[in-house]
Amino acid sequence: MTSVSIFASKHEVMPDPPDTRNSNGSGSVSLSPPRVRVLLLDDEPDNLFLRATILRQHGYDCIPASTIEEATELFNSIDIAVLDYHLGAGQFGTEAANLLRRRRPYVPIIILSATLERFFGGAEDMHLLKGHSSIEEILAALSSLEAKHRGAPVVVDARDFFYSRIAMAIGSDVLVQIFDERAIWLYCNDSAAEYLGQPRDWYAGRSPSQEMPALMRNWREIIETVALTRETYIDRTRLGLLNRPKPDEENITWSVLAFPVTLHDGRSGVVLTARILDRAAASYS
């Protein structure tokens, strides 16, 4: 399944009532589905133009609005809403989301924001990080909500987005792994995956103590302790993540941290990071 980089809220949206827009007026119905009408709310004209152009190229009808007042006038003629969070003049996309949810509860809503500082979990169905979410991720989110709009069952995976943003905040040059309280991998960034020798999507759901007992040190007890006590573990040795250092790293000092984190499903988890303190002597970068 292709992961969709989103935050999914707890709000469940039921499918819209059957759409009759594909009638040709003679009582017969076309077999081709109608184009999905997407409301784009953003106070930046350049953003509106660019986003609308791209979505139209992928088959969507785009209806732009630059203010909440303009958007509310369009509520009755849309299928999906994509709302920028930070609007001008002290307005926020969540205000439009709440208005739309009350007027038309079946319309899916996506909020775009520039940061993760605000907790999203209200009227919106999805939350995309503006500036980091690729157009492929936005199109995948729209496709998922389009299917939901038509009554098809949709499963949206928010985990990779959630954990990749944690890793992004730490830095791409740091080896980042995320575990649950049982020391099962949930996420591994590109740097850690390359260092440990497996593709990044190989790790989720596996146990390092079972899969890499000869390579990785046994982190199970440390991870379980950090998840339970919510205290940070610090290790500065020449071992790093491994049972024995690689030949070209025998004289390198590592900084390894294991610190608590709340997982996407509310459970306790642990972020395990590692970096070489003396980067000049490292064989990888």
Image (cartoon, rainbow, N blue to C red):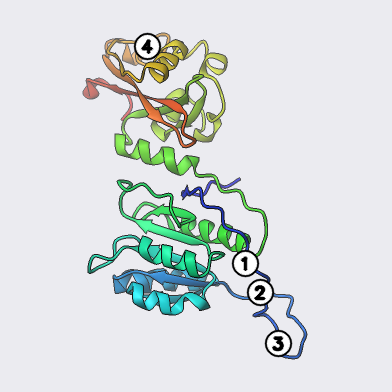
Q: Amino acid at mark 3?
A: Asn
Q: Position of residue 186 (x, y in %)?
A: 50, 30
Q: Are marks 3 and 1 in contact (CB under 8 Å)?
A: no
| Element class at badge 1 | loop
Q: Position of residue 276 (x, y in %)?
A: 28, 21
Q: Are marks 1 and 2 in contact (CB under 8 Å)?
A: yes
Q: Position of residue 25 (x, y in %)?
A: 71, 90
Disc 3 vs disc 4: which is toward the camera?
A: 3
Quadrant containing the C terminus in the rendered view: top left
What numbered label is drawn on residue 24?
3
What's the CA distance linking mark 1 and mark 2? 8 Å
Q: Residues within 10 Å of mark 3 (few under 14, many from 20)?
A: few
| Element class at badge 3 | loop
Q: In the image shown, does 110 or 171 lie closer to the viewer?
A: 110
Q: Please report whichever mark, 3 or 2, sits nearer to the chain's N-terminal start.
A: 2
What's the CA distance linking mark 3 and mark 2? 13 Å
Disc 3 vs disc 1: which is toward the camera?
A: 1
| Element class at badge 4 | loop
What numbered label is drawn on residue 245?
4
Which residue position holds label 1?
16
At horizontal 44% and vertical 26% (from top left) the residue drawn is 268
Residue found farthest to the right: 28
